[in-house]
Amino acid sequence: MKSAKRYPNRVLVVVAHPDDEVIGCGGAIARHTARRDLVNVIIMGEGVTSRSPVSDPLQGKNELRRLFRATQKAKSILGVQSLSMHRLPDNRMDSVNLLDIIKIIEEDVHLFRPDIIYTHHAGDLNIDHRLTHEATIIACRPLPGTTVKRMLFFETASSTEWQPPGVAPVFVPNWYTNITDTISLKMKALKAYAMEMRAFPHPRSLQAIECLARWRGASVGVRAAEAFMLGRNLEQ
């Protein structure tokens, strides 16, 4: 019997909406896949139906199809091995029982057995981001036998920095990933999500997101970086 193919790390990225995976940790994802790590992405929400222009059902279906094609293109650019979309209601995940959200993530964690988890920061303005964070923390609680050794929480442009101080936990990075060699792939993957991008100086613009990566890099002496808050790190 042939043994299963071994990878240096098994990485699970859990995000609320399509494009969050690229904005939050696209450079880190590309770095992982370049090192032959196995990367799976879970997208919890459908990312469309909260928008007033797509109140028409047919238009909404067309937008969902376009967004699905964008996720597949970004997946290919970053080298992600597997991507699943669960289509929870956009910006209305608080209408779903938290246990149901947790169970979706728990199933993937059980099947995939990741070593490393990336997800949203707890203090984001967006309710879907906060619930995805909470559900991921619960699904990956450190029970005996858990495979999860590291949890990293990323910033999401136009959500993390928009939360006023004192309302929720502030994003204060203490973990940086050098993406000098992969920032071009991050930006290329973001261009696949052109329908989600905004014009500069909106923080969800290509220019602003690249500027943030350059600033995070300059903060630690490299040309480009992504910043995270470390939630757990178990050294082996």
Image (cartoon, rainbow, N blue to C red):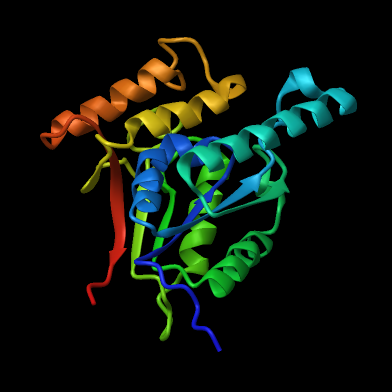
Residue 8 shows in this picture: yes
| Vertical placement of residue 168 versus 41, above or below | above
| Vertical placement of residue 124 versus 109, above or below | above
x, y percentage for residue 191? Answer: 51, 23
Quarter containing the N terminus: bottom right
**Closest to the observer: 105 or 37?**
37
x, y percentage for residue 36? Answer: 38, 57
| Vertical placement of residue 210 versus 44, above or below | above
Residue 56: image quadrant is top right
In this view, which residue lies farthest toward the top? Answer: 200
Residue at (22, 26) in percent of width and height: 215
Residue 202: image quadrant is top left
x, y percentage for residue 87? Answer: 72, 46
Residue 49 shows in this picture: no
Quarter containing the C terminus: bottom left
In this view, which residue lies farthest toward the front? Answer: 1
**Closest to the observer: 101 or 34?**
34
Residue at (40, 47) in percent of width and height: 29
Residue at (40, 51) in percent of width and height: 33
x, y percentage for residue 164? Answer: 38, 30
